[in-house]
Image (spheres, helix red, strand yellow):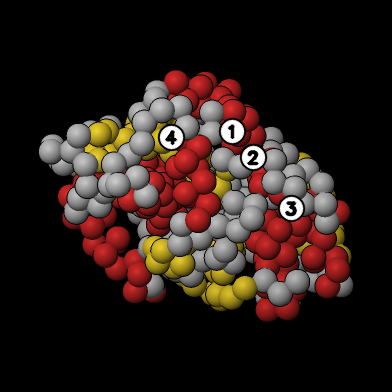
Amino acid sequence: MIGALSLTACGSRGGKSGDNAGNNNNASTTVVIGVDAPLTGDLSALGLGIRNSVDLAVKNANANNEVPGVKFEVKALDDTAKPAPGQQNATQLVSDSKVLGVVGPLNSSVAQSMQQIFDDAALTEISPANTGVALSQGEKWASGDKKRPFQSYFRTATTDAVQGPFAAQFLYNDAKKTKVFLIDDQKTYGAGLASTFKGEFTKLGGTLAGEEHVNPDDRDFSAIVTKVKASGADAVYYGGEYPAAGPLSLQLKDAGVAIPLMGGDGIQSADFIKLNPKSQGDFATAVGLPVESLDTAKKYIADYKAAGYKDAYETYGGYSYDSAWAIIQAVKNVAKDNNGKLPTGDGLRKTVRDAVQKVSFDGVTGKVSFDEFGDTTNKQLTVYTVKDGKWAVEKSGTFNG
């Protein structure tokens, strides 16, 4: 999970819903863009930013008559960041014939439960956040045997194959940390991120002071804090998400372990700082360049504010907007190739899927296009650090493997 769009305050829950976005009442055809994300629970700050950003893309498409004769709507479903509800949502979205594309999910483990269902129906799925490499390149990717398992799966977030090593290079070369204690939450995302970090960090000459696994729902880390304190580590790398990372970092600081905790985009949320008032100096990576610095994102940021959403766009907002816009552009191109009207019949979803593979446009987060695996061609990343209660840019660049 990756992004570079955090705000300093997540706001209250329950922003404007997107089930009936836009007002293009003269349109003759309704196309639904599905959203699957955690809209409730610990990760809802990220999920609501995803939903709202898709809603905004749909509103703009309808207001500008982006696809003449087509009215877009949003169907947002809550997966609570768990695979079983995600799988149920995938089935529900597939059963709605008006759904021609889905944005989501947030979690790589949830994506694993959905991919086959979407692929069997040739229904496009574009995640703004998944970083698990195997989702797009197959289980044997690390050995160089890369095979795309699902033609319907795409993502606008780059993968852990670059995010983990990028973090390792920063900690070793820039932060001068040579002895790291490695912890992960055993989920698809966290374990994968920790693994790719470990490979690069040890390759550079760094050593691991210890390795531990936690459960995503753990909040008492006293045993691990004791081990980290005794290990002599000069940093902690955590593969997982902010609901556990925040308390873990706080408990380390409370115990006098004055070393930074670093993680991936899963902790680069304003809620990490809310959970950890002693997070000053902690690090996180996220894909892309910081959205606030991008000319391409100025309109998105202004439109998001003007729309009055109660929730921040958060880490994956810009990538969610671009994911939805990729579906909209694919629908536009399909209609254009069919004398200005969407074709009918069972093959429409496959036609849209094939059109998504070919899209290329300047989006909120930069150039949006997909490679032969369905992965984003944007490989830029940013390291953030907590300064004065906010995530601040430390360094941007690309991973040099």
Coordinates of residue 160 in the picture (x, y in percent): 67, 55
**Going by the picture, which residue comes out furthest to the left?**
26
Coordinates of residue 41 in the picture (x, y in percent): 46, 32
Q: Looking at this view, is 125 or 172 the one in front?
A: 125
Q: Amino acid at mark 3?
A: Ala
Is residue 151 in sight in this rendering?
yes
Q: Looking at this view, is 319 or 281 the one in front?
A: 319
Q: Locate the C terminus by quadrant.
A: bottom right
Cα–Cα gap, marks 1 and 3 = 29 Å
Secondary structure under the numbered disc 3 in the rendered image: helix
Cα–Cα gap, marks 4 and 3 = 40 Å
Between circles 1 and 3, the one closer to the viewer is 1
Is residue 388 shown left or right of residue 199?
Answer: left
Secondary structure under the numbered disc 2 in the rendered image: loop
Q: Residue at x 68, y 63 (%)?
A: 162
Could you classify mark 3 by the number of other residues whose Cα lies within 10 Å: few (under 14), some (14-19), or many (20 or more)?
many
Is residue 381 in sight in this rendering?
no
Secondary structure under the numbered disc 1 in the rendered image: helix
- Counting residues from the N terminus, which is met first, the one under dot 1 or under dot 2? 1
Residue named by callout 2 = 150
Q: Residue at x 40, y 66 (%)?
A: 362
Q: Looking at this view, is 12 or 351 the one in front?
A: 351
Please tell me the numbered disc located at residue 358. Answer: none
Is residue 97 shown left or right of residue 86?
Answer: left
CB within 8 Å, label 3 to label 2: no
Coordinates of residue 328 in the picture (x, y in percent): 35, 48
Residue named by callout 1 = 119
Secondary structure under the numbered disc 4 in the rendered image: helix
Please tell me the numbered disc located at residue 348. Answer: 4
Residue named by callout 3 = 194
- Counting residues from the N terminus, which is met first, the one under dot 4 or under dot 2? 2
